[in-house]
């Protein structure tokens, strides 16, 4: 199967360098005039699919906002995933899973095996039980042409305590994660399938992202305070690898289809200008 890195590179060149999050939290459902229940969830998801599925390279549904409705919410998520992929979009499930052994293998099967009803192109993962503990997920991704985005430098203030702590060789914990993912992507063309999550609002941290050779997911743009022009300060030489992610800044313009489409066109233009390389 074609690698996730190759599919992502082609999708962003064709549709633009932006990821759109699908985060149907209660306040957003109310803003759209929808009930905070499974019917509202399904209506929300269908509107996003109808408006944007053929216009955005990759979508990032947040699993928790579907899980809160139990099996019925997960059924809605499965439907959205299928429809997005049928429209030619990639799907990155934001689940932030992290465990060990057979449990990690079960998570990998749930999201990255083509036989699973929850099958997606890529998934987010937490490395703080050790990057090596994610091995079953990396192996499943390789086998099926999938991707894994590993948390590295997040924008929440609590994250610094762990991510900026020093290990024995003087590197930060975040830099060790960055370096291990860089090793997994070594030699991949045109792009490795293992990415990192680096918050768009963290500013310059001194971490070296230049050798990653994989996608750098940058959440926090728009409503969370980040702007496209901030990306240069955060990512430096890794700018060409950045995948900017917007959620509320786009979704708040619904439920009108025209509002959603206009918002995507706006952020695509802003990111093309900010990233420059490969998109002008």
Image: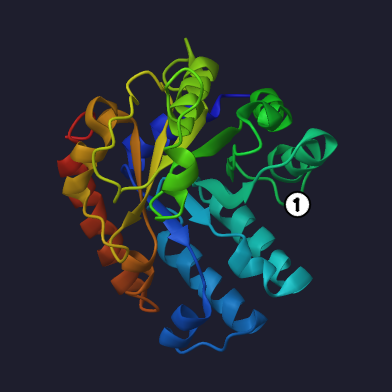
Q: Nearer the viewer, residue 50 or 211?
A: 211
- Where does the image place residue 52, in percent across and percent down from the top left? 41, 60
Q: Quadrant of the N terminus?
A: top right
Q: How many marks?
A: 1
Residue 6 appears left or right of 123: left
| Residue 152 in view in this figure | no
- Where does the image place residue 139, in percent across and percent down from the top left? 70, 24
Q: Residue at x 52, y 81 (%)?
A: 26
Pick out the residue farthest to the top.
187
| Residue 248 in view in this figure | yes
Q: Residue at x 45, y 58 (%)?
A: 21
Residue 157 appears left or right of 85: left
79 relative to 98, above or below = below
Query: Which class describes the residues within 10 Å of circle 1: few (<14), some (14-19), or many (20+)?
Result: some
Residue 213 appears left or right of 130: left
Q: Quadrant of residue 146?
A: top right
Q: Nearer the viewer, residue 178 or 67?
A: 178
6 relative to 198, above or below = above
Q: Nearer the viewer, residue 187 or 184?
A: 184
Q: Residue at x 58, y 85 (%)?
A: 36
- Where does the image place residue 59, in percent across and percent down from the top left? 47, 52
Q: Residue at x 57, y 24 (%)?
A: 2
Q: How is the image coloured?
A: rainbow
- Where does the image place residue 136, in percent across and percent down from the top left? 74, 29
Q: Quadrant of the C terminus?
A: top left
Label 1 residue SS = loop
- What residue is disc 1 on? 117
Pick out the residue farthest to the right.
102
Q: Quadrant of residue 57?
A: top left
41 relative to 137, above or below = below
């Amino acid at each position: 199967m074609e690698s996730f890195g190759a599919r992502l590179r082609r999708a962003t060149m064709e549709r633009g360098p932006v990821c759109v999050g699908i985060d149907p939290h209660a306040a957003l459902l109310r803003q759209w005039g929808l009930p905070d229940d499974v019917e509202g969830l399904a209506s929300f998801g269908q509107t996003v699919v109808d408006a944007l599925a053929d216009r955005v390279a990759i979508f990032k549904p947040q699993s928790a906002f579907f899980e809160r409705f139990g099996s019925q919410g997960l059924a809605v998520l499965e439907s959205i995933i299928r429809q997005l992929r049928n429209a030619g979009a990639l799907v990155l499930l934001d689940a932030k899973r992290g465990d060990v052994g057979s449990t990690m293998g079960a998570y990998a099967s749930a999201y990255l095996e083509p036989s699973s009803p929850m099958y997606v192109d890529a998934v987010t993962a937490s490395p703080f039980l050790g990057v090596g503990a994610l091995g079953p997920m990396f192996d499943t991704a390789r086998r099926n042409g999938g991707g894994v985005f590993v948390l590295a430098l997040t924008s929440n203030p609590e994250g610094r305590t762990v991510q900026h702590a020093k290990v024995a060789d003087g590197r930060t914990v975040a830099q060790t994660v960055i370096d291990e993912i860089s090793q997994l992507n070594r030699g991949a063309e045109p792009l490795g399938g293992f990415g990192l999550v680096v918050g768009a609002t963290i500013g310059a941290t001194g971490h070296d992202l230049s050798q990653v050779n994989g996608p750098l997911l940058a959440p926090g743009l728009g409503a969370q305070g980040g702007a496209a022009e901030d990306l240069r300060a955060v990512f430096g030489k890794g700018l060409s690898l950045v995948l900017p992610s917007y959620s509320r800044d786009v979704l708040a313009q619904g439920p009108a289809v025209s509002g959603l489409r206009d918002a995507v066109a706006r952020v695509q233009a802003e990111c093309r200008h900010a990233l420059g390389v490969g998109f002008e």
